[in-house]
């Protein structure tokens, strides 16, 4: 038998076993109830308009770039300052 057929049969067996366990243990009814309640709650959600999503996405992307550049600059300045201090104290004579 080919490895693909073995994989498909194994997957089918696992799914069949899982289905049997769900029905036997009573979890199937709980799962159906959960999905029904989820669908009901999702209908109550107030979804934003496309224009609002695009606008807030642009704000987030700009903020990420701004703070990335700012933190990169602060990191660079702190690194240079630390290198200067360490270089000052490791030189012979301290000057």
Image: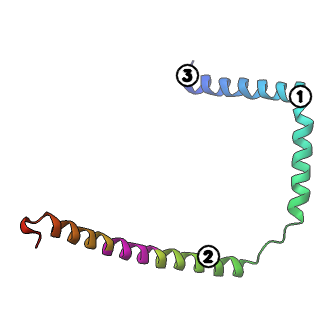
Distance between mark 1 and mark 2 Cα atoms: 44 Å
**Horizontal placement of 10 versus 63: left or right?**
right
Q: Is residue 20 magenta?
A: no
Task: Give the magenta part as a residue range.
Answer: 68-77
- Taking the spot 10% from the left edge, 66% from the top edge, the residue there is 91
Determine whether 53 is above or below 31 in the image.
Answer: below
**Residue 79 has which mark?**
none
Q: Quadrant of residue 57?
A: bottom right
Q: Which residue is mark 1?
A: 23
Q: Which residue is mark 3?
A: 2
Depth check: 36 or 4 in front? 36
Say few, some or many: other residues with alpha carbon within 10 Å of mark 1 (under 14 / 14 to 19 / 20 or more).
Answer: few
Q: Which tag is nearer the camera, tag 3 or tag 2?
A: 2
Q: How many marks?
A: 3
What colour scheme was applied to this rendering of the protein?
A: rainbow
Number of the front mark, 1 or 2: 2
Checking the image for residue 57, the label placed there is 2
Is residue 2 shown left or right of residue 12?
Answer: left
Quadrant in which the N terminus is drawn = top right
């Amino acid at each position: 038998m080919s490895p693909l057929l073995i994989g498909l049969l194994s997957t089918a067996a696992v799914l069949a076993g899982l289905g049997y366990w769900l029905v036997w243990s009573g979890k199937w009814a709980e799962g159906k109830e959960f999905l029904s309640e989820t669908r009901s709650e999702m209908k109550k959600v107030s979804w934003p308009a496309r224009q609002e999503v695009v606008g807030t996405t642009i704000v987030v992307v700009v903020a990420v770039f701004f703070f990335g550049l700012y933190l990169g600059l602060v990191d660079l300045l702190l690194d240079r300052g630390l290198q200067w201090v360490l270089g000052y104290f490791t030189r012979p004579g301290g000057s």
